Image (tube, grey):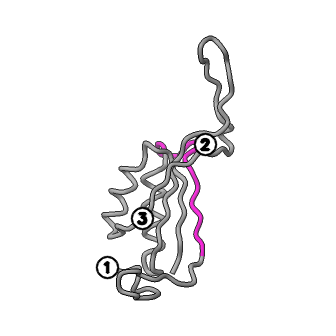
Amino acid sequence: MKMIVAIIRPEKLEAVQKALHEREVYLMTVSDVRGCGRQRGHTEVYRGAEFHVRLLPKLKLEIAINEPFVEATLEAIVHASRSGDTGQIGDGKIFVLPMDDCVRIRTGERGELAIGP
């Protein structure tokens, strides 16, 4: 079992969800987050004053997945969240973490059974 954590642009959420559904991956948690990386923010003007926005709005997807679905999930997220053919700075990151256990609260099922349908 793995926990996939993806940080993507907010406008890419629908495309990512569609790509995941095509690969039979339906379960995820989505959070509004803010962060910075190589993009380093941008400058805005508000009421005549210029200021630098360092933390940009992003979405954080958390997907608990069984091992057979990991590569398909990564591929779906990469292709759906990439800007254009070559991508741009700020498109995001994906982290793949080991997951020791999972418990479905309703039934008490554990491990891969708790993640599956």
Label whose residue precedes the other's in the sequence (2 or 3): 3
Amino acid under disc 2: Ile
Q: Secondary structure at mark 3?
A: loop
Q: Secondary structure at mark 1?
A: loop
Task: Give the position of the C terminus as an image quadrant.
Answer: bottom left
Establish if 21 lies above or below 104: above
Front disc: 2 or 1: 1
Residue at screen point 31% across, 64% down = 22
Establish if 85 lies above or below 99: above
Label whose residue precedes the other's in the sequence (2 or 1): 2
Q: Residues within 10 Å of mark 1 (few under 14, many from 20)?
A: few
Task: Give percent across and percent down for residue 18.
Answer: 32, 56
Residue 63 belongs to the span the image colors magenta: no
Q: Quadrant of residue 40?
A: top right
Establish if 17 lies above or below 3: above
Q: Name the residue beneath numbered marker 2.
A: 89
Q: Residue furthest front?
A: 106
Q: Name the residue beneath numbered marker 1.
A: 117
Q: Are marks 1 and 3 in contact (CB under 8 Å)?
A: no
Residue at screen point 65% across, 35% down = 41
Magenta highlight range: 83-97
Amino acid under disc 1: Pro
Label whose residue precedes the other's in the sequence (1 or 3): 3
Task: Give percent across and percent down for residue 82.
Answer: 49, 49
Q: Residues within 10 Å of mark 3 (few under 14, many from 20)?
A: some
Main secondary structure along the magenta-highlighted residues: loop
Q: Name the residue beneath numbered marker 3.
A: 28
Amino acid under disc 3: Met
